[in-house]
Structure formats: structure tokens, C-alpha cells
């Protein structure tokens, strides 16, 4: 009798765990499949970059006109010409992080997409 009770408890534990995982997986799959696919066409890269910066953590260290922890965006724009090569260079520095360019405080890496970071760099370099 004891054996049957122990077996029943163990069986219920396994069943309850497996059902829970199935329902969690089903919920996750449903959430992922419900996300819409957005094909956004950007008509103004500068405005898009400004919007992306305003919605990110960048403004915690940078301002348009004044140096904070990092350089102001206008200082960056004054140092680099607005060329595709410099947009690429700044985009890489934003994604990978950088140090020693503007002082001792390093800029941490960011997990933004390359496309979005290029818009951000385009905005920054437009501030001459």
C-alpha cells in the first residue's frame, strides 16, 4: 500500500511538471507567433536616428550641446566628417563599445542592431 501511494505521488509530480512545461511552451510559441512583422521604411535617417537615441540609454552619458560622462554629440560631429565610412566607424564603436577616444571613461557595448546604430550615427554627424 505504501508503495502504491509513493508511486502515485511521484507519477503526479512528473505529470504536473510535464503539463506545466507544455503549457509554458505553448504560451511562448503563441506569443512569438503573434508578434507582427514590421517592414519599416525610413524616409528621414536623421529624424530616425534622433528618435532612436531619445528612446535609448544614450542620453544618460551624452547630451547634444554639453559634455557629460561622454562627449556631446556636437563634439563628435565636429571631430568626424559626415561620410559613410565615419557612420560605419561610429556605428561599430557604439555596438562594440570604445575607450580612450574621449577620455578615460569607456563607453560600454550596446546591443542595438547595426541598421539602427547607423541611423543614430547619421543623426550625430548631422549636428555640425
Image (cartoon, helix red, strand yellow):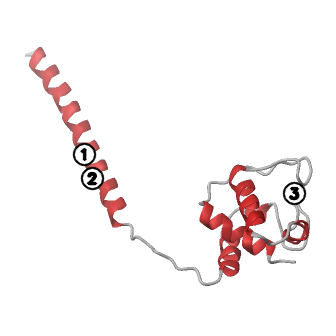
Q: Residues within 10 Å of mark 2 (few under 14, many from 20)?
A: few
Find residue 113 and report its horizontal and vertical position in percent.
59, 60
Secondary element at tag 2: helix
Q: CA distance from mark 3 to mark 1?
A: 47 Å
Q: Position of residue 15 (x, y in %)?
A: 19, 35
Mark 3 packing: few (<14 Cα in 10 Å), some, or many (20+)? some
In the picture, residue 127 is in which quadrant? bottom right
- Residue at coordinates 80% horizontally, 72% vertically from top-left? 82
Which residue is at 62% across, 61% downward?
Answer: 114
Residue 109 visible in this rendered orientation of the protein: no
**In percent of the image, x 20 and y 25: which residue is there?**
10
Residue 39, compared with residue 79, is above or below; it is: below
Residue annotated with mark 1: 22
Q: Is residue 20 above or below residue 88?
A: above
Q: Earlier in the sequence, mark 3 or mark 2?
A: 2
In-front residue for pair 82/73: 82
The local crowd at label 1, few if under 14, some if 14 to 19, many if 20 or more residues have their Cα within 10 Å, is few
Can you identify the residue that label 3 sits on? 69
Q: Secondary structure at mark 1?
A: helix
Quarter that holds the N terminus: top left
Is residue 5 positioned above or below 59 on the image? above
Residue toward you, 77 or 111? 77
The residue at 26%/37% (across/down) is 17
Residue 51 sits in quarter: bottom right
Residue 114 vs residue 15: left or right?
Answer: right
Between tags 3 and 1, which lies in front?
3
Name the outermost residue toward the left: 1
Whole-angstrom CA distance, mark 3 to mark 2, is 45 Å
Find disc 2 in the rendering and name its residue: 26
Quadrant of the rendered structure where residue 9 is?
A: top left
Amino acid at each position: 500500500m505504501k508503495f502504491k501511494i509513493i508511486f502515485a505521488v511521484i507519477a503526479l509530480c512528473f505529470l504536473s511538471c510535464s503539463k506545466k512545461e507544455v503549457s509554458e511552451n505553448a504560451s511562448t510559441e503563441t506569443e512569438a507567433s503573434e508578434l507582427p512583422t514590421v517592414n519599416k521604411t525610413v524616409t528621414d535617417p536623421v529624424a530616425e536616428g534622433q528618435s532612436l537615441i531619445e528612446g535609448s540609454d544614450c542620453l544618460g552619458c551624452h547630451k547634444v550641446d554639453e559634455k557629460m560622462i561622454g562627449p556631446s554629440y556636437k563634439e563628435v560631429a565636429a571631430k568626424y566628417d559626415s561620410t559613410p565610412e565615419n557612420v560605419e566607424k561610429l556605428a561599430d564603436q557604439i555596438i562594440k563599445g570604445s575607450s580612450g577616444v574621449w577620455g578615460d571613461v569607456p563607453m560600454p557595448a550596446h546591443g542595438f542592431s547595426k541598421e539602427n546604430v547607423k541611423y543614430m550615427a547619421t543623426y550625430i554627424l548631422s549636428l555640425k
